[in-house]
Image (cartoon, grey):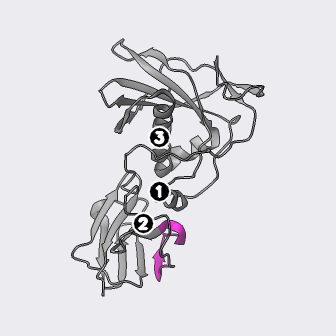
């Protein structure tokens, strides 16, 4: 049974975790390790935010979105080749875990946070660019019970940056923590107003836009950048976003990138400074 004695005379409760997902990853020296993401209703859920609010958090220099978790001790489990590998159990809230399973943006962010938590607690230098969620295995080894502090979740006293793994390239060093511009699209189909956000860079020379385009493929997306207009269309699923912005765009130098796992289109819009 694992106990996390972080405070003297603290009240604890015993939690039996439910299996969730097993992550296989590697340290920067090539050592394989496993992370069992388990869950329970006995641990607090994070604040309930939408995808775009999460993207806005990820665009900040200091991310304040807190995922309550309990981390078990390092133990050894045999992989499919019979080799002992370091294994860690991390407990999160059941409702939040289910949300992650249906929202790739939250799941990728959560994996990054969990890997960073192992790095901070055990000094494991995990390569965040290399991890695999095992399809046919929810648990490596056997889950043990957790003893967790019986109190409300607290905000961390010091904010530390996440591992240097860009999520859909959101953690761009030039993104500020202020949302510069957000306007209701003139025309929308199947896209809710909150499903895009545009931020302005520190150097004031470009905008970065994130557009949530569910059920899309890169070959189906048509992007038309006018002088002060952004048109994004997916004719296959009848989606159209049409936005005017108070800036002049250099459409020949602007860059687009689509993450099919997160269904997020990222536009780096180079501005013509008049």
Q: Earlier in the sequence, mark 2 or mark 3?
A: 3
Examine the image and state in which quarter residue 40 appears: top right
Tell me the element at label 1: loop
Q: Which residue is mark 2?
A: 211
Examine the image and state in which quarter residue 204 appears: bottom left
Tell me the element at label 2: strand
Does 85 lie within the magenta span? no
Q: Which residue is mark 1?
A: 61
Res. 250 in view: yes
Binning the other alpha carbons within 10 Å of mark 3 as few (below 14), some (14 to 19) or many (20 upward) gives: some
Q: What residue is at 38 percent from the left and 33 percent from the top?
A: 126
Q: Earlier in the sequence, mark 1 or mark 3?
A: 1
Q: In the drawing, does residue 83 fall left or right of residue 39?
A: left
- The magenta-colored residue range is 185-196
Q: In the drawing, does residue 186 fall left or right of residue 50?
A: left
Q: What residue is at 31 percent from the left and 80 percent from the top?
A: 249
x%, y% of residue 43?
Answer: 68, 36
Residue closest to the eye, 208 or 210:
208
For the view shown, which residue lies furthest in the top direction? Answer: 82
């Amino acid at each position: 049974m694992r106990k996390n004695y972080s405070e003297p005379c603290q009240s604890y409760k015993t939690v039996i975790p439910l299996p969730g997902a097993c992550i296989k990853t590697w340290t920067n020296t090539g050592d394989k390790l496993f992370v069992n993401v388990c869950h329970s209703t006995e641990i607090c859920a994070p604040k309930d935010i939408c995808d775009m609010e999460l993207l806005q958090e990820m665009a900040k220099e200091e991310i304040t979105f807190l995922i309550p978790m309990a981390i078990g001790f390092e133990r050894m489990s045999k992989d499919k080749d019979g080799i002992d590998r370091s294994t860690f159990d991390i407990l999160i809230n059941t409702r939040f875990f289910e949300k992650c399973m249906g929202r790739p943006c939250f799941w990728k962010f959560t994996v990054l946070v969990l890997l960073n938590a192992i790095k901070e607690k055990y000094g494991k230098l995990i390569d965040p660019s290399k991890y695999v969620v095992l399809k046919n295995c929810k648990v490596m080894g056997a889950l043990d019970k957790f003893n967790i502090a019986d109190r409300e979740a607290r905000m961390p006293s010091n904010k530390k940056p996440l591992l240097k793994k860009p999520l859909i390239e959101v953690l761009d060093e030039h993104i500020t923590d202020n949302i510069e511009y957000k306007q209701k699209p003139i025309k929308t189909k199947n896209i809710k107003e909150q499903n895009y956000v545009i931020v302005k860079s520190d150097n004031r020379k470009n905008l970065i836009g994130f557009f949530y385009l569910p059920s899309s493929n890169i070959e189906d997306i048509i992007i038309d950048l006018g002088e002060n207009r952004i048109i994004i269309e997916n004719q296959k699923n009848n989606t159209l976003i049409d936005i005017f912005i108070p800036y002049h765009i250099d459409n020949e130098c602007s860059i687009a990138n689509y993450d099919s796992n997160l269904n997020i289109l990222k536009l780096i819009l180079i501005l013509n400074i008049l």
